[in-house]
Image: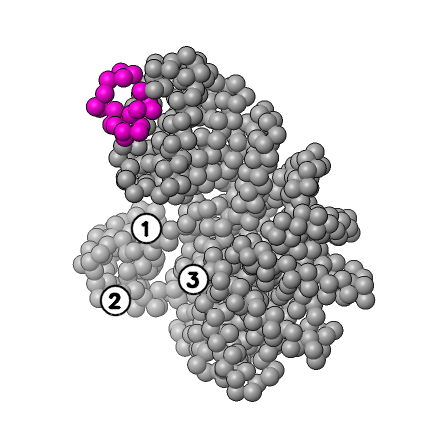
């Protein structure tokens, strides 16, 4: 369970989920508790879906009772529990607050419990607890101050109530720190007492025992009370709780650019406080960020996101922060960057068309980088429409942003399988970059080459139009060669990418010599970059090894091809362990290709471990709750059975074939035609393995009868490719039966499947 999950950065939560799920031997429930499901949640859902094939579920915490009239028993029970804890008789306690049934604030359990505690304390001290929920924090905090005063009077702490409130203010901002960092915070914002910071830390620990042995400066709990204490101590409110002018100065002293261990926690806490206390936002937080906007780079996405949720947020500040993040674009602040852009997009009607277009274009790119491709396409299309309109009105300076947005849009359209639209966008980007490159070749030729390479990739890989793909891919390579010769090492990565695209286009056009030449050059460039820059280029080096291996195979250099493909697969395995969502699909494709190549060569024993790995990849998805992957798991399991049979591991093959049938049977019984065809194949295969391996021959009739029954209920208008799959499975089994000396059974099977006779109409094999 993770409390205050909205204050965690996305990468930390992903690491936690990965660690918990990877070592689990049973289903694991990970519960994230947060105050809201805002931008941080959207970012996390997207990343969890990509990384782990899971769809997290958001559950709103509803009131404990559905009817206001039911709050009174809850209040009474809370009073009883607090009274018992404080050893106070329940009888003399006052009546419930007058607004208990009518005020919606009491829907929150925390408000109800705070009111109950206030009433118990009022009974002890012979005072009156407030009926107004908004005054509960001030009342409880006043009792806290009384507690500090008593400790000071008894000589248990040296800090008087004024000094203790200032220490507590620092603790409320920083949260728990190490002893060294805690004393550093007290030195940064000295309290009004001539005591060594170490002594003050000890005084604070007397009042609030640390939650960990190695930490100091424990804040108030729950967080609402802590935030209310910050707000009440900060000047600018009109509540009956004295603010301390020292606190305004302390904020500036604690939150200075340059990085401190408490900056992120302090700004996040301050932003959450500002949501309910306008004076904190407008008189302190926003002026602080106007003076030092770079603090947001240290604050983290949680603080930036909380800032965008403030009421009446200053638009100029948002623009300043957006400009700062757009210039530097730290990866760990992508969620905060998206939150700022979303804030601006929601107010797009206030901006001229060019600014609206730029905001939408930036959101398209940021959402795409976050894996939210559908949303990226929507914002990209909106930006393109605006930029086209501006271009039509004569705004020539919009051509470059339009070309860049079209390039991004093309990529995300491909990832959402809108392949023709992706090609159209890529071609339009090329057209604009050609125009730009004529006037400023040094600035735009690189982008033109990348856009041409994208066009070639769309044609060759996504649309299968190889004859059209070669020209743009070749042109991209020639442009990048010229750029690389003029300025060596600057464009090496782009040239390697373009060469790989040219290799794929040439392979699709069956120009194997050109495909191999381009793939080899691309691989050599990637190796050079990897040697110079290390793991940064390992994913693209992995792709280059794969492209080269496939090119080698097509030219008949099988041993070299397999070595390159195996090296690529080994690298993908390492990458998939780190970021499963990004690299597992590529690993799966690589393993399937290797499986097919080893099968062509007749290396039967090589097939089994590859098939086992493919099963494990799909099994992990199903185990994570993605039941839509059961058909893929069934196919992978059946392929494993075939591989095990080929390696004469007959017992294992029988078990795997039966499991494959079990996995697909439910979908087949629901009438999913593709699954029914797969079940026919798997049942015939299970029977064939038993016949050839001479294992459990008594189970063969049941498999055959079930296969015939499924085949009999298939529609007469079955597509030819599916009908052929069934016939191939039956014919292979018939040949196996005949080879085993059971020609009668082979002939009867042939007769029955040709007549599509259900098994309950004949008695053979019973």
Tell me the tag on residue 750.
Answer: none
Q: CA distance from mark 3 to mark 2?
A: 26 Å
Under circle 3, the secondary element is loop
Q: Which residue corresponds to the image point at 64% horizontal and 70% vertical from the top-left?
A: 327
Q: Is residue 324 left or right of residue 685?
A: right
Q: CA distance from mark 1 to mark 2?
A: 22 Å
The quadrant the C terminus occupies is: top left
Q: Which residue corresponds to the image point at 27% horizontal and 65% vertical from the top-left?
A: 104
Tell me the tag on residue 103.
Answer: 2
Q: Position of residue 346 (x, y in %)?
A: 43, 74
Q: Which residue corresponds to the image point at 69% horizontal and 75% vertical from the top-left?
A: 437
**For marks 1 and 2 on the same chain, the one whose residue lies earlier in the sequence:** 1
**For marks 3 and 2 on the same chain, the one whose residue lies earlier in the sequence:** 3
Give the magenta range.
748-766
Q: Nearer the viewer, residue 176 or 618?
A: 618
Under circle 2, the secondary element is loop
């Amino acid at each position: 369970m993770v409390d205050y999950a909205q204050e965690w950065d996305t990468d930390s939560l992903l690491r936690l989920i990965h660690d918990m799920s990877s070592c689990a031997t049973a289903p694991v429930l990970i519960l994230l508790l947060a105050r809201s499901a805002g931008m941080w949640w959207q970012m996390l859902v997207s990343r969890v879906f990509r990384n782990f094939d899971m769809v997290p579920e958001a559950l709103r915490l509803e009131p404990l009772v559905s009817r206001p009239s039911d709050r009174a028993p809850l209040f009474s029970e809370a009073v009883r529990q607090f009274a018992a804890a404080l050893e106070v008789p329940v009888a003399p306690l006052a009546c419930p607050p007058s607004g208990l049934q009518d005020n919606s604030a009491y829907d929150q359990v925390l408000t109800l419990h705070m009111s109950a505690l206030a009433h118990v304390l009022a009974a002890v001290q012979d005072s009156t607890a407030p009926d107004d929920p908004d005054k509960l924090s001030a009342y409880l905090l006043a009792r806290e101050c009384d507690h500090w005063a008593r400790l000071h009077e008894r000589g248990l702490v040296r800090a008087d109530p004024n000094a203790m409130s200032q220490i507590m203010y620092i603790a409320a901002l920083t949260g728990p720190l190490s002893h060294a960092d805690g004393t550093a915070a007290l030195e940064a914002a000295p309290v009004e007492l001539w005591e060594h910071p170490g002594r003050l830390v000890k005084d604070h620990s007397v009042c609030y025992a640390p939650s960990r042995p190695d930490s100091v400066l424990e804040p108030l709990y729950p967080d609402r009370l802590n935030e209310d204490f910050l707000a009440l101590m900060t000047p600018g409110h009109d509540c009956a709780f004295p603010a301390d002018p020292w606190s305004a100065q302390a904020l500036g002293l604690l939150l200075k650019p340059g990085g401190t261990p408490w900056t992120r926690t302090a700004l996040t806490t301050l932003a959450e406080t500002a949501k309910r206390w306008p004076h904190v936002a407008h008189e302190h937080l926003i002026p602080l960020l106007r003076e030092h906007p770079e603090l947001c780079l240290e604050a983290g996405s949680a603080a930036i996101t909380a800032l965008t949720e403030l009421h009446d947020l200053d638009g100029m500040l948002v623009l300043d922060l957006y400009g700062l993040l757009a210039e530097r674009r730290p990866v760990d602040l992508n969620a905060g960057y998206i939150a700022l852009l979303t804030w601006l997009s929601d107010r797009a009607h206030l901006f001229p068309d060019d600014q609206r277009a730029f905001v939408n274009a930036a959101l398209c790119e940021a959402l795409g980088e976050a894996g939210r491709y559908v949303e990226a396409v929507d914002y990209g299309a909106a930006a393109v429409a605006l930029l086209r309109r501006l271009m039509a009105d004569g705004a020539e300076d919009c051509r470059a942003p339009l070309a860049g947005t079209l390039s991004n849009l093309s990529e995300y359209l491909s990832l959402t399988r809108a392949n023709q639209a992706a090609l159209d966008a890529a071609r339009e980007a090329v057209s604009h970059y050609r125009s730009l490159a004529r006037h400023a070749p040094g600035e735009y030729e690189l982008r033109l080459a990348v856009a041409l390479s994208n066009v070639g990739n769309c044609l060759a890989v996504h649309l299968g139009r190889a004859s059209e793909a070669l020209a743009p891919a070749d042109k991209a390579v020639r442009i990048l060669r010229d750029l690389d010769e003029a300025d060596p090492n600057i464009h090496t990565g782009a040239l390697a990418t373009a060469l790989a695209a040219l290799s794929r286009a040439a392979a699709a056009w069956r120009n194997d010599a050109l495909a191999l030449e381009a793939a080899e050059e691309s691989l050599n460039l990637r190796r050079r970059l990897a040697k110079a820059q290390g793991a940064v280029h390992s994913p693209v080096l992995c792709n280059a090894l794969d492209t080269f291996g496939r090119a080698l195979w097509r030219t008949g250099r099988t041993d070299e091809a397999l070595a390159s493909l195996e090296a690529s697969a080994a690298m993908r395995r390492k990458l998939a362990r780190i970021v499963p969502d990004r690299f597992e699909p590529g690993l799966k494709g690589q393993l399937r290709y290797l499986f097919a190549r080893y099968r062509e060569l007749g290396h039967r024993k090589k097939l089994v471990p590859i098939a086992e790995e493919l099963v494990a990849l799909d099994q992990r998805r199903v185990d994570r709750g993605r039941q839509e992957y059961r058909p893929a798991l069934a196919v992978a399991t059946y392929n494993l059975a075939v591989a095990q049979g080929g390696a004469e591991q007959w017992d294992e093959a029988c078990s795997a074939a039966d499991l494959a049938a079990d996995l697909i049977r439910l979908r087949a019984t629901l009438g999913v035609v593709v699954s029914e065809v797969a079940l026919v194949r798997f049942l015939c295969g299970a029977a064939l393995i038993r016949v050839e391996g001479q294992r459990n021959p008594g189970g063969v009739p049941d498999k055959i009868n079930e296969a015939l029954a499924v085949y009999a209920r298939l529609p007469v208008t079955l597509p030819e490719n599916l009908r052929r799959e069934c016939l191939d499975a039956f014919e292979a089994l018939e040949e196996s039966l005949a080879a085993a000396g059971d020609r009668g059974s082979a002939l009867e099977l042939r007769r029955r499947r040709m007549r599509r006779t259900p098994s309950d109409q004949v008695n053979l094999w019973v």
